[in-house]
Every structure is written in C-alpha cells, then in structure tokens.
Image (cartoon, rainbow, N blue to C red):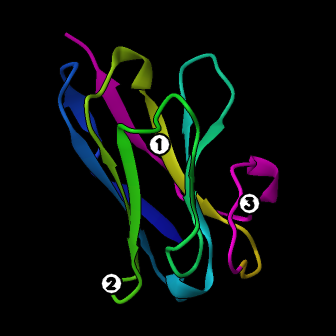
Amino acid sequence: QFVESGGGSVQPGESLRLSCAASGYGLEYYAVTWFRQAPGKEREGISCIDTSGTYINYVDPVRGRFTISRDNDKNTMYLQMNNLKPEDTAVYYCAAPEFSWRGTCSLSPDDMYFWGKGTLVTVSS
C-alpha cells in the first residue's frame, strides 16, 4: 500500500515536497512512478525512478523543476516540486508495477499495479 502526503495550496513560484510511503512491502524492490491527474484530463506519468535511484526519467513539463528521489531505508519516495505553476494543479499519485524492475522505470499507467489514493496540489494566485 502507498500513502501520499505533502500536497496543499500554494502560489505560483512556490515549492512543495510530496512523499510516498510504502507499507506492507519493501519499496527497495520496486521502480516507482509519480503520476498526476488534472481536472478533466487523463492521468499522466511525470517522473519515475528505478530501484537503486540511478535511472530517473521526467516528462518535459516538469524537467528542471521537479526532482524525484527515494530513501529505501525509510521505505519512502519523494517528489520535490519547485517553481510551481497553475498548470501543475492536480491530484498526485505514486505507483509501482507488480514485479521488480531493475535499471529502468515506466511512465505508463498501464504498467502499474500498486497505487496510492493521491494528494491534491493546487497552485493559484
């Protein structure tokens, strides 16, 4: 089970750090992905990280502003979001595939098996 936290309401240009805590299994065995879903839009993968943290991927709209990381000792993954924009407003989810992926990760929701319930991020002036 994944539990996301850290969402909230901020103004454009501000920062938030989201956390994704895993319970019931070791997060270290899974590549993990952050997704977001804005109102009226499909869920999209925005960043992922492999089991060791050496392979990381971002989509262009967040590259350079968001940083994904993981602390396997704490069974937690993070998404540092800087310079937030109104278009970043969405519910943010963390997810992982059913089986362990080493050396890579996926941004496709079709590859995911475990999902959290999400945390809302609102960026507005």
Residue at the right extreme of this rendering: 110
Horizontal side of residue 89 vs 98, given as left or right: left
- The residue shown at (73%, 68%) is 97
Q: Residue beneath label 2, please?
A: 74
Asked if the residue under mark 1 is in contact with the one under mark 2, i.e. CB atoms within 8 Å, the reply is no
- The residue shown at (49%, 74%) is 53
Horizontal side of residue 121 vs 49, given as left or right: left
Q: Residue beneath label 3, please?
A: 112
**Amino acid type, mark 1:** Tyr
**Image quarter of the C terminus:** top left
**Amino acid type, mark 3:** Met
- The residue shown at (65%, 35%) is 43
Neighbour tally class for label 1: few under 14, some 14-19, many 20 plus, Cα within 10 Å: many
Is 22 in the magenta? no
SS under mark 2: loop
| Picture layout, residue 114 above or below residue 86 | below
Q: Residue beneath label 1, please?
A: 92
In space, the residues marked 3 and 2 are separated at their CA atoms by 22 Å
Bounds of the magenta segment? 102-125
Q: Earlier in the sequence, mark 2 or mark 1?
A: 2
